[in-house]
Image: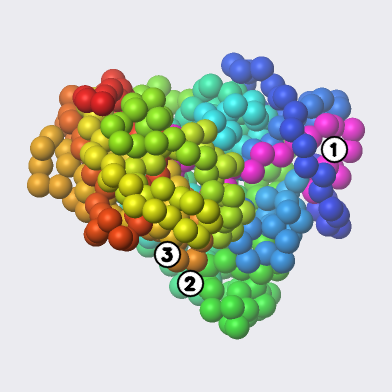
Amino acid sequence: MKEIYKIPRVSVMAWSRAKARPVGQPASFYDFHRRAKGGERLTVAFMGGSLTWGAGASDPLKTSYRALIGQWLEQAYPQAHLSFVDGAIGGSGAQLGAFRLNRDVLAYQPSLFFLDFTLNDGTYQISPDTLAAYEAIVRRTIREAGCPVVQMFLASRADIEAGQLDKMLRRSAHLKLSRAYHTAVGDAIVLMQRRYQRGQLDLDRLWPPERFDTTHPGDAGYVCYAEAAWQALQKAIARRVVCRVPEKMLFGDTYQTWTRTPVAELRPRGWHTATPKMGYLAFDFLMSRWLDSLCVGANFVELDRVKTRPAPAAGPLRVGFHGSTVLLFGESTPRSGRYRVRIDGGAGTEFNACKMGSTGNGHLWQVIAEGLPVQEHTLEITPLFVSSKVPAELRLESICVAGGDAKVWPIDR
């Protein structure tokens, strides 16, 4: 295979935003190459978890796989006007991604899309709902944006040491999707396994033992990820691959209908609107990047950054919905408490909204139901308070529903 462009030396990448291709055009990798060579304005988008953001890299804006691909594209196509969209939230998966796709990716009209989530959703395990969500992301990107997709299979240290591809059930399922949708695959797992087996990789260099982290690599690991992505892109361009949308979905159509309904629009009694916290545990956890509103159920009022005073406790949020999967999306703070969810008047399940512990602010996303009968249901979300002397809150942006009519409506206010 003749290489379109050799990997250049790394340089600092300029980041900007630009409009891209009109919706409805064929999702062709060679067309991206042709238009970039012609000096057009194109947008390249990335979506995934912390490995897409670049956790563990010395400077994620320069040395993550996402940043390296951006730099190599700019050097391969110096006449093009490229912009790059970072849609990565650490610790998130395809289920949340399906509800974020329009806002955080498709709104930018991407001309090329790199998709993660294979590792975050569990490389060695599968579930119907996560596969349906991932397929919906691939399908909608190709169909609605006319955008070619590179599926990324990123690796942890254990994935390289084990070398058991046949046990990686999610990788196998995602490869099946690639064959059906004619996507490109940036398989860092295979690339790194082969180099390791040949004695060409020092895993202690990629994942330094003193970090006590065998998931997020250092810069050398991100170079391997980027090389897998680049090779996949080169191959797809050279072969003039065009992504397609098969008539029938492989893993179910649950996420073909969806809604991300703002809680603020439901106006629950005793709750108040707020803005995301500006202190954050990591930049991909800065929720002002990902949320358009917030509605808070609490038992206190903030007086300053430290002091609070008791306030009447917020009551339950009650809604009706039509669908089969329900996910809550919002913000976690050190004051986030527990909450109870009842569906159709059932016994209820408790969840902890304090996802980041006492260390800082970040995302709250929780799948509270999946596989429900596709019909109307009721949902009650109740913040739980230990006492009026212990400040606690539940900070929600949206109730996300997939399947069926995918609708949410208030029952009482």
Visible in this render: residue 113?
A: yes
Helix, strand, or loop for circle 3?
loop
Q: What residue type is labelled 2?
A: Ala
Q: Going from the N terminus, do you reach mark 3 or mark 1 first?
A: 1
Q: Which amino acid does label 1 sit on?
A: Tyr
Disc 3 target residue = 357
Q: How is the image coloured?
A: rainbow
> Residue 162, image x and y in percent?
46, 73
Quick one: label 3, few (<14), some, or many (20+) residues within 10 Å? some
Cα distance between the residues tagged 3 and 1:
44 Å
Residue 361 lies left or right of residue 398; in this view the side is right
**Image quarter hosting the C terminus:** top left
Helix, strand, or loop for circle 1?
loop
The residue that appears at 61% across and 74% down in the rendered structure is 207
Cα distance between the residues tagged 1 and 2:
36 Å
Mark 3 or 1: the one toward you: 3
Residue 346 lies left or right of residue 410; in this view the side is left
Disc 1 target residue = 77
Helix, strand, or loop for circle 2?
helix
- Residue 89, numbered circle: none
The residue that appears at 58% across and 24% down in the rendered structure is 145
Residue 307 lies left or right of residue 327; in this view the side is right
* Vertical arrangement, residue 22 with respect to residue 315, above or below: above
> Residue 186, image x and y in percent?
60, 50
Disc 2 target residue = 158
